[in-house]
Amino acid sequence: RVNGHHQENDMENLSLFEIVKLGKSATQSVVDDWIESYKTDRDPALLELINFFIHCSGCKGAVSSEMFRHMQNSEIIRKMTEEFDEDSGDYPLAMAGPVWKKFKLSLCEFIAVLVRQCQYSIIYDEYMMDMVISLLTGLSDSQVRAFRHTSTLAAMKLMTALVNVALNLSINLDNTQRQYETERNKSIGKRANERLELLLQKRKELQENQDEIENMMNAIFKGVFIHRYRDVIAEIRVVCIEEIGMWMKMYSEAFLNDSYLKYVGWTMYDKQGEVRLKCLTALQGLYYSRELNVRLELFTSRFKDRIVSMTLDKEYDVAVQAIKLLTLALHNDEVLTAEDCESVYHLVYSAHRPVAVAAGEFLYKKLFSHHGPEDEGRPRRGRQCLNANLIRTTVLFFLESELHEHGAYLVDSLWDCASELLKDWESMISLLLDEPYPGEEALTDAQEAALIEIMLCAVRQTCECHPPTGRGPGKRVLTAKEKKTQLDDRTKITEMFAVALPLLLAKYSVDPEKVTNLLQFPQYFDLEIYTTGRLEKHLDALLRQVRDVVEKHTDKDVLEACSMTFHALCNEDFTIYNRVDIVRSQILDEQIDKFHRLLEDVLQEGEEPDEDDAYQVLSTLKRITAFHNAHDLTKWDLFTSNYKLLNSGLQNGDMPEQIVAHALQCTHYVILWHLAKVSEGSASKYYNDYGDIIKETMSKARQIDKIQCAKTLILSLQQLFNEMLSDLGCNFDRSTSAFCGIKELARRFSLTFGLDQLKTREAIAMLHKDGIEFAFKEPSPQGEGGPPLNLAFLDILSEFSSKLLRQDKKTVHLYLERFMTFQMALQRDDCWLPLISYRNSLQTGADDDTLSVISGMSSRSSARSRRSKPPAASKRKLDVSVWVNHEQSGPHTPVMMSSPHIVSTVLRDAKKLRPEQGYMGVYSMSNEMQHTPLQQPHQHMDYNRRGSGLMEDDEEPIVEDVMMSSEERLDDLNEGMDFDTMDIDLPPSKNRRERSELKPDYFDPASIMDDSVILDSGCGVFLRLGS
């Protein structure tokens, strides 16, 4: 636009819908132009606005001037329904891509700006708003999903804009009343009567405007929200809950009460995760404010248990937001009981990182963020500082959770909110080394062991910069800032623990558990610091302590930790290598010489070694074996010594079992080190022989069990895929050599099944089943709406589609759709290409199933009933019912399922019905229900009287089959309940006593929800702890 007007050539002839869709013009200018045309001639302008909403729904038809003048709104809607293109699977709000996402934002902005620009005059002209509200209310009751979805969004955004207007009116009314009171209280000589009259007139005008706005909001709330918040389509329910949350937050005096909160509370039992999620995010906006928190006490008392149970929701995103909501509820210490908190605490050990991080934040805020007056005078460092006290609390929590092997999970959960605490190495070391102050309780042995483990996990997380195994997609590429932080932290760790580690080893040298953890610290050191920081004497002290540990201990874990410590320190790239290598060689010389002496004594005696000799041989052999695992000891010729020992035991039969086991293990390492040297550069000459062996092995395996062989093939591909994800991360490029290599391997695997599809029918079907389940197994790392983590595996799986029989492709396609949501079927972005290509590979040579734009649900049932034919005779019948017909029990909630089809054609003549719509007679309605007249265009709408076409109170909607039944997705919340819905009544200003207060509306969800719904609405989930 130029200077607020359409560009002459490009924009003049475009419709309002096209202008908003293109998004090239400022919304303010578009609205101003429409207002100008409305003021000039309101009928054509209003007709343009009506067609705007019709076209936003995806309808190709248009309301003509003749229709606008002579037809009721209900007749117009019926006419538009008949012209709706049912063969199209898309409408603007359901279409994917940046253009349509931007369009949705532009539509919402257009409505908001329209109301804002009209708030001082046009919305009170008893014409424009009457027509718009009447149209949107009628469309929201349509059986056409596109009409219902679009009009509900528009109506809810219109309501939000009106709430903002009402809020401004309330503020102006209070200001005017205050000015009036001030002027009236002046003495008679100073009082300005003319000003009093003006203020009275202004107050009266504002009061009338506010009453008019209340009527409009009541019409939208009763006519649209009351029915659409429980619509059969989840996206429509989401819109309603999102907007009511906005109303309560924007104008809390009017909407933040139990009369409106109850709708959010009831909808938390919705069976669709995205709806439950929106309830929680709406509540978060309210609980975030301490001022509003106080007014939520009744709601909290009624629905707290439900919120707590949602922390175990099967949808991870819902569980995360439930935990965050409970974290906000901690503003009030009396809300959550100890039992409630305990149910959240244990989630820090969840394998799903977002859940664990949210639980970690809850734990930190509950246990660590409260500082009393006694904490003010604490020193900043040492064992009496505030952090030292918090570290003690962390240790106690870790011990009480009785999941000691998951220390890394606890640290990772607290990392985002308490990394400064977990990086306070100085306080941790002080707690372990310094003597307790008088009156201070010393750490117990178990607490010291737990603290060392937590300290090690924190050091590992600092240096590796990624979550522990089992959480998250694995390693990722660090930013420049993260790399610098990593290097700085590693330097601090080296400087501090290079000094402290020898002291800690000296103190705990006899404790295997503590020593094993302490010996892992050097692998995270920056070894250059030993030289640049002049810390060689501390290195010598460390080597002495490690040498002492080797001599004292025979525990396998301790000895392997010593071996790995030398492996980390013996790095030829650093100047300390010679110093460390000398000590390592001395230790090995001593142990191997000792082993040879003991072996000679045992072999010379020629009889069974006594208990003391056997212990000496075993302990020495354990040390040598532990070192040989990580170090090349071939120069000591241990093979000959072990051979003599094993041969003696074989001949005499008196060698202790443990000695034999360690001798075999040591010999195994000897062979591996030799093979490593021999095989370097010579692997290629064995390639052909190895390939023949593998081919023959696969052939024999298939002869034994075709299905298990197929499962093994798909498992190997899954393992390669997981390894690739660990190396490249979740955002890898499918053109990389790693992915292409896996796909090529899948192609070769596919060729091994031969040409006889009947022989491999069950095996191929089972292979596809396992592949589909793997692809949808992990949720999207991008959150709700993103592709599952393993979705790209479908690209690999498509290599096996050609091996499916034609009829089996339909079965596999049906099974695939059980894992898909409706939105997935609409996605066209690059990240969804594997799903698209796999579906196409299954539909090659098979009839396509279609989706109906009207109901948004899959029309497979009716399509199959029309095309069903007797199956062709075959040698065998594939029994796939075992894995197709069972109810889905995984973490995904399938929505691509058959359900009563909601079509717009019930409004047409019977002769116009297509064949597939013939069965809809079951859902036919009376004429009174089908053709409820809306308000005449040229009459002022009375919002508060029956027969106006707007829904009254909480009565059942006109089209009942768009509502959810108890056997569908959400139990009918109206069943057995008299809602007693209130009119929207804006609160009186502080000086207005003539308006009555809102009546309290107490409610009990148990009266409308049976136990099965409360228990089975999505709160059950397994907590998978990592190993």
Image (tube, grey):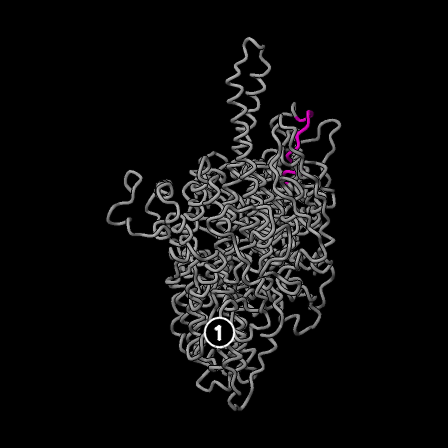
Residue 980 seen in the current view: yes
- The residue located at (40%, 68%) in the rendering is 741
Residue 620 seen in the current view: no
Q: Label 1 sits on what residue type?
A: Leu
Task: Count the marks.
Answer: 1
Q: 417 above or below 554?
A: above
Q: Closer to the camera, 178 or 723?
A: 178
Q: 116 above or below 143?
A: above
| Residue 155 on the magenta span | no
The quarter holding residue 546 reads top right
Q: 580 above or below 334?
A: below
Q: Which residue lies most toward the left here?
A: 9
- The residue located at (57%, 82%) in the rendering is 705
Q: Which residue in the protein does label 1 denote?
A: 913
Question: Residue 440 placed where, x, y %?
Answer: 73, 30
Q: Which residue lies most toward the top here?
A: 189
As helix, strand or loop, the secondary structure at mark 1 comes to: loop
Q: Closer to the camera, 489 or 725?
A: 725
| Magenta highlight range | 364-375
- The residue located at (58%, 10%) in the rendering is 187
Callout 1: 10 Å neighbours few (<14), some, many (20+)?
Answer: some
The quarter of the picture where the N terminus appears is top left
Question: Residue 303 placed where, x, y %?
Answer: 69, 47
Question: Residue 979 placed where, x, y %?
Answer: 68, 50
